[in-house]
Image: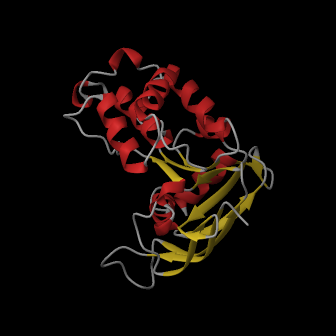
Amino acid sequence: MSALSAQGLTARYPGQPVSRPALLDVDLDLERGERLLLLGPNGAGKSTFIRVFAGLMHAARGKALVAGHPARAAREMVGVVSHATFLYDELTAAENLRFYGQLYGVPDVAERGAALLERVGLTHAAEVQVGRLSRGQQQRVAIARALLHDPPVLLLDEPDTGLDAGAFGPLEELTTSGERTVVLTTHNLSNGLRLGTRAAVLSRGRLVHQQPGLSSVDGVPLGHLLEELARA
């Protein structure tokens, strides 16, 4: 059984023409421990793919499965990091993690939260309100939030937003350790190449290429391919 599976997946936003959905007939399978670098120009459907598997958006047609379960029924198996932090500004970093940990039924949530804040380099900011943290620090707390319940699937939609170069190391370490299955979108191709083990390319909602390696697509460097798709 695949850790994550898209089967004829089609998705559209309200008011979007039926003939031009955000995703169209996407077929993709990821096994446990695989880390997919999902590439494509702006508007290709990358964030929509993440939203469907995060249970934040319905599929119009086809299936989005996490370990064989419909994505919307498997949210406890998924962690999400995006450019939106999903944090409460008026709560401290530690309080945010306790809140989300209680929602997921995480045992010893205070200790788990403290350990994750240490791993993302924010022990000193545990009792600071999130709204007073820098954008990069907020993103680090969001990474800790996504990993609180130790999800087997991690969805990363531009996770390096606002992160300074030194903060990417902990994200890489936390993401690549263990048997976690990962889907990653990023505009920073060098970061994506560090995290991913395979690649897929979306263009205008269609999956136009997927491959096991990351260096090139049929001999064409990935960066050049994306430039061509953006001009298409």
Q: Residue furthest bottom?
A: 18
- For residue 162, say whether it is visible: no
Residue 178 location, quadrant:
top right
Compared with 153, 44 (above or below) is below
Compared with 226, 95 (above or below) is above
| Residue at x-position 51% and y-position 59% | 46
> Could you tell me residue 162's position as x and y percent?
39, 32
- Quarter of the image with the N terminus in it: bottom right
| Residue at x-position 66% and y-position 58% | 200
| Residue at x-position 45% and y-position 79% | 20
Q: Residue furthest front?
A: 107
> Could you tell me residue 154's position as x and y percent?
56, 48
Asked whether, in this view, residue 108 is left or right of residue 4, the answer is left
> Could you tell me residue 45's position as x and y percent?
49, 63
**Rendering colour mode:** secondary structure
In the depicted view, which residue is nearer to us: 151 or 166? 151
Asked whether, in this view, residue 126 is left or right of residue 189, the answer is left
- Quarter of the image with the C terminus in it: bottom right
Compared with 218, 5 (above or below) is below
In the depicted view, which residue is nearer to us: 58 or 188? 58
> Could you tell me residue 191's position as x and y percent?
59, 35
In the depicted view, which residue is nearer to us: 14 or 152? 152
Asked whether, in this view, residue 40 is left or right of residue 148, the answer is right
How many marks are shown on the rendered structure? 0
- For residue 93, say whether it is visible: yes
Q: Residue furthest top?
A: 124
